[in-house]
Amino acid sequence: MRMKNLLGALGAVFLLGGLAFAQEFSGLARVDATQTSATDTRGGGQIELSLSQGVPYRIFTLDAPRRLVLDFQEVDWTGFPERNFLATDFVTDIQYGTYVPGWSRLVMELGAPMKVDTAALSVDDVTAGALLSIALVESDANRFAQSAGAPQDPRWDLPAPQDLPQRLASNPDAPLMIVLDPGHGGIDPGAQAEVQGRTVSEKDIVLQFALELGDILLRSGQFDVRLTRNDDYFVSLERRIALAHLAGADLFVSLHADSLSAGYAHGTTIYTLSDEASDVASAKLAERQERSQLLSGTDLSDTDDIVADVLLDLARVETHPRSLNLAQSISDALTVHGGPMNRRPLRSAGFSVLKSADIPSVLIEIGFLSSKRDLDNILDPDWRLRSARGILNGLLAWQEDDAARKTLVRQ
């Protein structure tokens, strides 16, 4: 596989309350579910997280919604007693899993503003087992908001606004640069479905499809390809846009296989950006994307500033029609070579991942895990191959049409 990964290995940062956490550990820690608990206390909560060994960790809070975030290097969450945490008054939602390579994350949405009163990791000298004890106490909304925010580190975070490079114009004779964006990943599994006693996750399905599609695009000789992720780790929506600019993308194609109520969700659907959703189902999908982002512990407090230089309305005057043409070309080709298509295959919504102003962008729902027919298709290698070839044909048709339009404009 000639595909190149956009994301380099991230270094470790061991922070607690702004101070370095100096203990050295290695290997994968496992959760001991029998000794892990969350309990309500008077005006707060107590968390006891039992691990097979000590690992570096950091704790911080995020606002809107209020969340407590715990990062570890690295934890196997198998058997984690999620129900125990959700049975408390202070935890209203919870998510856990891989965040970035080498790091795991536990995110708890809080029912009220709280602050970390004490946090301590004790390690047994004999068994090497570790117990992380966290005491939460009442706070107020203003104090919580003022203290919330992720520790800043260049190995984790987006570059500052002034450091985001301007996308360079492509060589007209070079293959088009396409950034494929497999949705979700790591701590964010996306939609899920049960298949013969096993859980199938959207994050895994779309990554596999992205790799297969990328290979076909590369073999055509007409496109160069990059991925926003090439393994099971989390990439924020804003970082996906920034990575497309860093790659000098000519096109951005986000891939999903979501789940919606019966009657809404059947067949391949292609989305473009709009301020208002074209229908109720599209609005629900966009809301779910934002919700997954928040539950993954992403700090969105500076998002508007970070991408402000990219989201230029003037650039969209040219880019948006090209995105619409791209969606139409892919839809036409998939109708012939892929399918089955949704009865309304072209839709629009306010997907954050489509907000790059100067890169034509589409989001393709290759199918919906809530549809048995779609799920069977998505798990079928032959269907995925036909659909990938359909997308290739759509991209080739768009490339030819877009070049002709540019020629007319110059004349």
Image (cartoon, grey):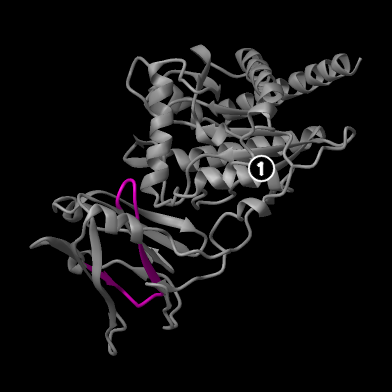
Residue at 20%, 49% in the rendered image? 111
The picture quadrant where one finds residue 225 is: top right
Residue 79 visible in this rendered orientation of the protein: no
Q: From the image, tell me which residue sits under label 1.
A: 244
Tag 1, which secondary structure? Answer: helix
Q: Is residue 319 left or right of residue 301?
A: right
Tell me the kind of residue under disc 1.
Answer: Ala
Give me the residue at 58% from left, 48% from top: 229
The residue drawn where x is 53% and y is 14% is 345
Q: Residue 308 magenta-drawn?
A: no
Residue 131, percent across and down? 25, 75
Whether residue 184 can be seen here = yes
Disc 1 residue crowd, few under 14, some 14–19, many 20+, Cα 10 Å: many
Q: Position of residue 1 (x, y in %)?
A: 71, 48
Q: Quadrant of the C terminus?
A: top right
> Could you say where residue 314 lies in the image, as x and y percent from the top left?
68, 27
Which residue is nearer to you in this view: 322 or 394? 322
Q: Farthest residue in the bottom direction?
A: 125
Whether 51 is among the magenta residues is: yes
Give percent across and percent down for residue 342.
49, 14
Q: Which residues are magenta?
A: 48-66
Q: Residue at x 64, y 15 (%)?
A: 328
